[in-house]
Image (tube, rainbow, N blue to C red):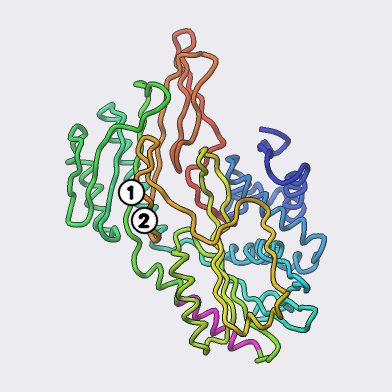
Amino acid sequence: MTGKRKRVLDNLGDAGHAELAFQAIECAFNPLWLEAEGPHPIKKLWKRRDRLSTVELYIFGFALEKLQRTHPEWLKMTLKKVKTNNPYIGFITEIITFAQLEAIQGRVDPAGANQKGYDLVTTYEHGAKHFISIKNHDVSDPQKEFNQHSKQLRNLWRQKLRLEKENLALRVYGKAPISIEDFEDLKRYIQKDIDLYQLKSVQVNSNVQVTVSPLYRTNGEVSKGHISDMIMVIAPGPNSEQLRFRRNIIAAAANMKKNIEADGNACNVIYMRVHVNADLEYLGKVAQEILNEGVSGVDCILFYQPSYVRNTDNASIICNSFKLAVNMRYVHSLDGRAGYKISAALGTFSLNRSREIIQTNGVNADDLPPNLFIFQEGDVYVVSHDPNAGYMRSPAVGIREHAVIHIEGREITVSAVGYALSDELLIV
């Protein structure tokens, strides 16, 4: 940990950029407000010390620092909404998007106060205009419920392992979306019927099956003095997940058509941030179909899907994925030379959704399809016989390894604070 904020600020932009970004956050929000209790996502990130929270805050602070220089009055007005208007994430998305969107041969400005149809307007040197509506589609209520019930399963699983003094992994698979009734069946099964020594798949009901298995291979012996556990719950998301995005695209287009006066020299653009579970290919096809129908009043739809991913060296990075749908009216408006440049604060760029892969002992098993609900958590305590070293790492999303060191007959546990329990993005 470095600095007064007790955060590691390495590899965050050019030298000094990270400090400027965090200063911008402290300037925009009273430090007492940042440190106060509450459900606000910025407060939650400020209290955490893991790398993911630092990355998200840096990206937000990077945007604040830029807009404090270029559009201070708009930023001041929008920050008031960020603090008080729930859902806050929509206004946070406006700030980050505005900061990273640049027009080639033109300029991007905020819409006027109380403008209902759009948030930004691009004016090009050759006279064309683009009205941009920024939309945000975060994690859905069904996925929140899935995560909540999965966490309850993990608590019951840990209780069972503690009772039996075992270190094991539990995998739960649903053929169809896992209902509340399915979760109740799973909870009863773990509490009453599960056989920890029957290392094969068991069908709990017609939809869900469970498998008890040894933990993955670690770089050392798993401690017998601690309970090490892992749980994975995986199932298709309900069809309503993708239909929700389609409805929201149509609603956003209708809002622009209703509130923006038709202008033969202007195009309407929707910039939509979508959750990591969204099927980006599906959304691109739906958007193109809507544009091709020619009645939506929208000429361009750009989807932005940020995700926190692992590379082949297991290092975590932000992946900025985009999917673009346009009609010919939008193409002609660029006059063959204008356009946009997106300057993200961190990470890689892709025109495809980031891959999700199941690994078994470090071996890639399967690429997972989109629109899956996945919950994975675990704590594994690994013994080091070297009193000067121990293993502390996060080998996969939600899994944390703790170092157990023997010193003079005593067992000392060392845990890292730099690993988040989830790779879920709160504000980016």
Circles 2 and 1, Cβ within 8 Å, touching? The answer is yes
Residue type at numbered disc 2: Phe
Q: Residue at x 29, y 58 (%)?
A: 178
Q: Residue at x 73, y 73 (%)?
A: 110
- Residue 146: mark in rendering: 2
* Label 1: element kind: strand
Which residue in the protein does label 1 denote?
A: 233
Q: How many marks?
A: 2
In this view, the residue in front, 212 or 287, is 287
Relative side of 426 to 18, left or right? left
In this view, the residue in front, 348 or 316, is 348
Image location (x, y in percent) of residue 395: 46, 36
Q: Is residue 249 magenta?
A: yes
Relative side of 73 to 172, left or right? right
Q: Earlier in the sequence, mark 2 or mark 1?
A: 2
Image location (x, y in percent) of residue 420: 52, 42
Residue type at numbered disc 1: Val
Q: Residue at x 70, y 48 (%)?
A: 32
Q: Residues within 10 Å of mark 1 (few under 14, many from 20)?
A: many
- Cα distance between the residues tagged 2 and 1: 9 Å
In this view, the residue in front, 345 or 291, is 291
Relative side of 259 to 73, left or right? left
Please say if 360 is above or below 387: below
Image location (x, y in percent) of residue 256: 60, 83
Please say if 132 is above or below 66: below
Visible residue check, residue 303: yes
Image location (x, y in percent) of residue 26: 74, 50
Asked where in the image residue 213 lies, by quadrant, the reply is top left
In magenta, the rendered stretch is 247-260
* Label 2: element kind: helix
Q: Residues within 10 Å of mark 2 (few under 14, many from 20)?
A: many
Q: Nearer the viewer, mark 2 or mark 1?
A: 1
